[in-house]
Image: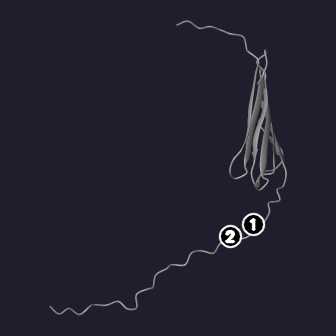
Amino acid sequence: MCIHSQPPQPYSFGYDNVDEFGTQSYHKEQGDANNVKTGTYGYRDANGIFRRVSYVADANGFRATVDTNEPGTAPGSSADAVFNAKPVSVPVVAKSASAPVPAYAAPGAFGPTPWSG
């Protein structure tokens, strides 16, 4: 088995997409000749709920900062991640339709049927 060691190569990539529901997702990352990676990724949905993760990955490990307004999150630090949580104000959406009503009639009575044979 032959193993070749190559020095880190600088690179950059990214995407930004919006789907048919209005949800945006994105990711951008750069890597340098010292093997340091920096980037950001996240999403924002049609209701305005978002999460953005900014990160650095290098000889000191992976460190992230999370900005979000997702319900149930709170500001704080966990491991090497910092959470910047903000309250969300989601618009109230009116009901679109009532529940369907069955389109059949219930039987009038149930019992033995006379048979003449």
Residue depicted at x 72% and y 10%: 7
Find residue 17 and report its horizontal and vertical position in percent: 72, 41
Q: Secondary structure at mark 2?
A: loop
Whole-percent x and y of residue 28?
77, 32
> In the rendered image, which quarter is residue 3 located in?
top right
Kind of residue at disc 1: Val
Query: Please, what is the three-letter code of the amino acid marked with disc 2?
Result: Ser
Picture quadrant where residue 37 is located: top right
Q: Nearer the viewer, residue 10 or 104?
A: 104
- Work out whether 48 lies above or below 113: above
Q: Which residue is mark 1?
A: 93
Query: Residue 95 appears at what percent x and percent y?
Result: 70, 71
Residue at 17% across, 93% down: 116
Q: How is the image coloured?
A: one colour
> Can residue 89 be seen here?
yes
Q: Is residue 58 above or below residue 80?
A: above
Note whether residue 61 is visible.
no
In the image, what residue occupies the spot 78% across and 38% down?
53
